């Protein structure tokens, strides 16, 4: 070997060693950051950010309930003003266009908080609303909030007669055909519409100026279907008939229905006073009880008001965020996964503490899911601190996989938790072979045409990300691909792979999320990367890598196929791309190296990564999320798995 070749080889070796050293430093700093964020009780929790409606609705809620706190209202308002767009509107996610209902609610909330019609930001918002049709264009949920404070007549809301609560579970149409979130919201709305409570606010705090014509001349309509002959059109006609009944209900039947709805709300209140784990259920259920005559000092309502405080997150600088829900089980499971995958010993004190906290929060109560699975033993976990009625498959699958790897001191307790969790998750498989979040066989898609279902998420259908996650859990718990549930799930993923090789992600943005989740689950359960399904998925990820080496995808991809896998690179989505390639490729190559390098080069001074984008999904096309810890634990998982691959490849 000549001197020049030897120098090149030495230079390459030095560069490779430098890259290895940098990888070690990045992983170590991210681990330290993650450990610093663990709560003494053993869990992790970060803010979960959605659109401005959360803050706006909380302000409206305080005024309706008669519990306004001036300082809190000011902090909620400051956040609203910070996220307002230059054109005066409020959007669903950074970079998205203005969203009508969010803008109307935010406008009203700021008026309630003391801003006046002549203020610059209020003027800009009003101009945006009026140029797009004025207040009649407000969505269904926004109309309920506005009606509660006398800004709209109750007749402008979609008809949801409380008699729906009397429909039997054995009937083809009943509330348990709705998704858990739609069901929980419906009970609050039904009671509010039946009782029609109105809390008067001053003229100055109202939104009369958002009417183009005087209120008594203004016509409110329901969203129309794309075709004249459609389910949506038929249901719109049904709404008129239901309102005729609403105006003249059968007195005895109405009283029975109100009593049944009240009982359902009381039966479904969690130990901390909340409902359903999500903001609409927290607020609307409490408002409904007030409509029934409950005073704020009643123990049930007092506990409910206290529970709503759980949704508030202090952002500092006199700003408060109202979150759509809290995510301690989810954050704890993924943080523990990040430590495990990045090389922390399985008996690390932080992991044992997290494992015990998770075991202590396992749910052994039959929730709403048991309506479809009456013989299934409970054993899942919720997303939140308190949500025993609605454990979810996604959280439970990740938690079981993590617990299976943690070396707990109480081995028998861990084994019981893993066994019960596995049994519950696998038992929640739907008849089509896939997995949903909260219910099994919740697939009556025609319900999305109901006027009440303006967000088109009245059901909880099976999806690729959850199906992949369950396969990953099964592998961690020792199951093989020949298990009947695994076989059915694998077949489901094979059927639902898109023609371009990707999978859609229901609970993350969007195809990058779904593809990484499916590939990781398939590889874990034993599907070889040579399989055509795996090759196509990995090829799609490679094709969507950005020139800078990262991955990114806009929330717009739910609506516009041109945006699939397209968007500015983000830490969480780049991590998903890296993990997807590690799972889906026989021999990961340059694309993997570039993705890992993108992450290593962008770690911030605190040991995490900066991410302002919304990469989580609540309701496709209508509700997106920013998990504030995604930009820490997902990059750490990806780099930990990348390091493990380097070691196995002898590099």
Image: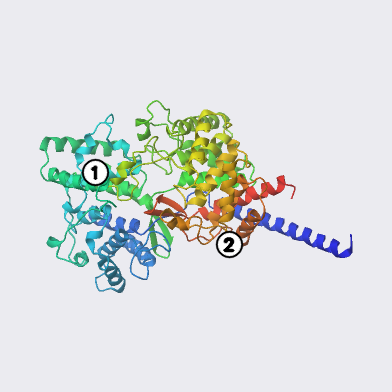
The residue nearer to you, when weighing 555 against 85, is 555
Q: Which residue is mark 1?
A: 298
Which x, y percent locates residue 624?
41, 54
The residue nearer to you, when weighing 221 against 338, is 221
Residue at 17%, 52% (x, y): give it. Answer: 154
Mark closer to the observer (2, 1): 2
Numbered badge on residue 604: 2
Which x, y percent locates residue 322?
37, 55
| Label 2, label 1: how far apart the Cα atoms are | 49 Å
Q: Secondary structure at mark 2?
A: loop
> Does 421 sit left or right of 241 as displayed?
right
> Does 546 sit left or right of 590 as displayed?
left
Residue 375 occupies which quadrant of the picture? top left
Res 377 seen here: yes
Where is 432 relative to 13, above or below? above
Q: Earlier in the sequence, mark 2 or mark 1?
A: 1
Residue at 26%, 42% (x, y): give it. Answer: 187
């Amino acid at each position: 070997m000549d001197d020049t070749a030897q120098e090149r080889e030495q230079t390459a070796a030095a560069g490779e060693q430098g890259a290895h050293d940098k990888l070690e430093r990045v992983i170590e700093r991210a681990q330290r950051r993650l450990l610093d964020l663990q709560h003494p009780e053993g869990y992790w929790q970060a803010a979960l950010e959605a659109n401005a409606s959360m803050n706006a609705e909380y302000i409206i809620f305080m005024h309706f309930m008669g519990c306004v706190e001036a300082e809190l209202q000011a902090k909620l308002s400051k956040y609203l003003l910070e996220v307002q767009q230059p054109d005066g509107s409020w959007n669903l996610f950074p970079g998205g266009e203005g969203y009508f209902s969010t803008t109307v609610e935010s406008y009203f909330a700021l008026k309630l908080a003391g801003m006046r019609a002549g203020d610059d930001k209020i003027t800009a918002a009003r101009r945006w609303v009026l140029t797009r049709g004025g207040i009649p264009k407000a969505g269904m949920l926004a109309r309920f909030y506005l009606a509660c404070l006398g800004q709209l007549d109750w007749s402008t809301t979609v008809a949801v007669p409380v008699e729906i609560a009397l429909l039997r579970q054995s009937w083809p149409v009943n509330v348990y055909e709705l998704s858990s979130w739609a069901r929980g919201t419906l009970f609050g709305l039904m009671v509010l519409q039946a009782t029609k409570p109105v809390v008067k606010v001053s003229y100055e705090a109202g939104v009369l100026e958002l009417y183009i014509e005087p209120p008594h001349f203004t016509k409110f309509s329901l969203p129309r279907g794309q075709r004249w002959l459609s389910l949506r059109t038929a249901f719109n006609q049904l709404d008129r008939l239901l309102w005729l009944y609403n105006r003249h209900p059968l007195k005895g039947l109405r009283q029975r229905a109100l009593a049944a709805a009240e009982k359902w709300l009381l039966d479904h209140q969690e130990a901390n006073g909340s409902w359903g784990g999500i903001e609409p259920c927290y607020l609307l259920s409490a408002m409904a009880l007030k409509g029934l005559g409950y005073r704020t000092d009643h123990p049930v309502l007092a506990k409910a008001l206290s529970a709503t405080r759980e949704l508030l997150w202090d952002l500092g600088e006199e700003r408060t965020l109202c979150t759509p829900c809290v995510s301690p089980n989810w954050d704890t499971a993924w943080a523990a996964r990040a430590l495990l995958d990045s090389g922390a010993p399985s008996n690390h004190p932080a992991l044992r503490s997290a494992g015990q906290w998770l075991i202590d929060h396992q749910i052994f109560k039959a929730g709403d899911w048991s309506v479809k699975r009456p013989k299934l033993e409970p054993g899942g976990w919720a997303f939140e601190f308190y949500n025993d009625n609605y454990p979810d498959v996604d959280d439970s699958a990740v938690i079981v996989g993590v617990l299976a790897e943690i070396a707990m001191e109480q081995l028998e307790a861990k084994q019981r938790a893993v066994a019960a969790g596995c049994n519950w998750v696998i038992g929640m498989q739907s008849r089509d072979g896939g997995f949903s979040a909260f219910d099994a066989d919740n697939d009556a898609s025609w319900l999305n045409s109901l006027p009440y279902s303006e967000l088109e998420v009245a059901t909880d259908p099976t999806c690729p990300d959850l199906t992949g996650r369950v396969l990953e859990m099964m592998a961690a718990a020792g199951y093989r691909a020949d298990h009947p549930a695994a076989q059915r799930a694998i077949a489901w993923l094979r059927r639902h792979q898109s023609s371009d090789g990707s999978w859609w992600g229901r609970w993350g943005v969007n195809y990058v999320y779904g593809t990484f989740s499916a590939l990781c689950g398939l590889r874990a359960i034993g599907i070889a990367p040579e399989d055509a399904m795996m090759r196509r998925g990995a090829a799609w990820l490679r094709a969507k890598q950005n020139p800078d080496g990262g991955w990114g995808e806009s929330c717009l991809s739910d609506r516009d196929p041109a945006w699939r896998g397209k968007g500015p690179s983000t830490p969480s989505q780049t991590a998903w791309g890296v993990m997807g390639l590690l799972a889906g490729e026989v021999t990961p190559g340059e694309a993997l190296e570039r993705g890992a390098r993108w992450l290593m080069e962008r770690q911030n001074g605190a040991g995490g990564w900066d991410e302002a984008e919304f990469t989580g999904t609540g309701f496709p096309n209508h509700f997106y999320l920013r998990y504030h810890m995604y930009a820490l634990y997902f990059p750490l998982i990806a780099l930990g798995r990348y390091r493990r691959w380097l070691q196995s490849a002898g590099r």
